[in-house]
Image: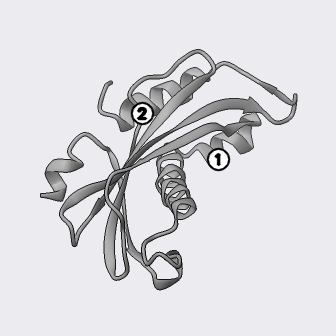
Amino acid sequence: MSDKLLADYPVVVEQAVVWGDMDSYRHVNNVVYFRYFENARLEYFRRLDWFAFEKETGVGPILAATHARFRKPLTYPDVILIAARVPEVGRDRFTIEHRIVSRSLGAVTTEGEGTIVTYDYGRGAKVSVPEELRRRIAALEGRE
């Protein structure tokens, strides 16, 4: 079931829901979902080899905005699949879409997005998404 729910996502991270992720209402606290998204986002960047690219060029990512839509509550114990994909790239930014699937529920529990701006840390200014990063995103997404 989860394979079907995540078929269009090139990056999927599996992780356990831990007891400490829950709040007094006995479900995962809303803020924790953003950490889950971050885990998948960083894995996406790792697969782009963005950290080495940033070291060479000074151009790195900045999370400019994020949001989540909570569909079903997560609880301990569970194993979740956190997915990431980039549907399109703009001039100086792109949106990374996330989906979280619960193994115990066999369903999507959360969907969200993050807006990533490309930023030149040496100059202290946002820049156009470099062609090399565009190429790497297209390759990871299977669009080359």
Please tell me in which quadrant of the rendered image residue 27 appears.
bottom left
Badge 2 amino acid: Val
Indicate the position of residue 126 as horizontal and vertical percent values. Answer: 75, 24
Q: Looking at the image, which is closer to me, 125 or 34?
A: 34
Q: Quadrant of the N terminus?
A: bottom left
Q: Residue at x 46, y 54 (%)?
A: 40
**Which residue lies at the image location 29% right of the left edge and 32% below the top edge?**
142
Task: Give percent across and percent down for residue 89.
Answer: 49, 22
Q: Which residue is mark 1?
A: 52
Which quadrant holds residue 78? Answer: bottom left
Label of residue 33 in the image: none
Please tell me which residue lies in front, 50 or 124.
124
Query: What whole-number distance in Å separates the C-alpha atoms at marks 1 and 2?
Result: 20 Å
Q: Nearer the viewer, residue 65 or 139?
A: 65
Regarding mark 1 in the picture, which secondary structure is present there? Answer: helix
Looking at the image, is 27 positioned above or below residue 19?
Answer: above
Amino acid type, mark 1? Ala
Residue 30 sits above or below residue 22 on the image: above
Given the current orientation, which residue lies at the most extreme right position?
A: 123
Per the image, the residue denoted by label 2 is: 86
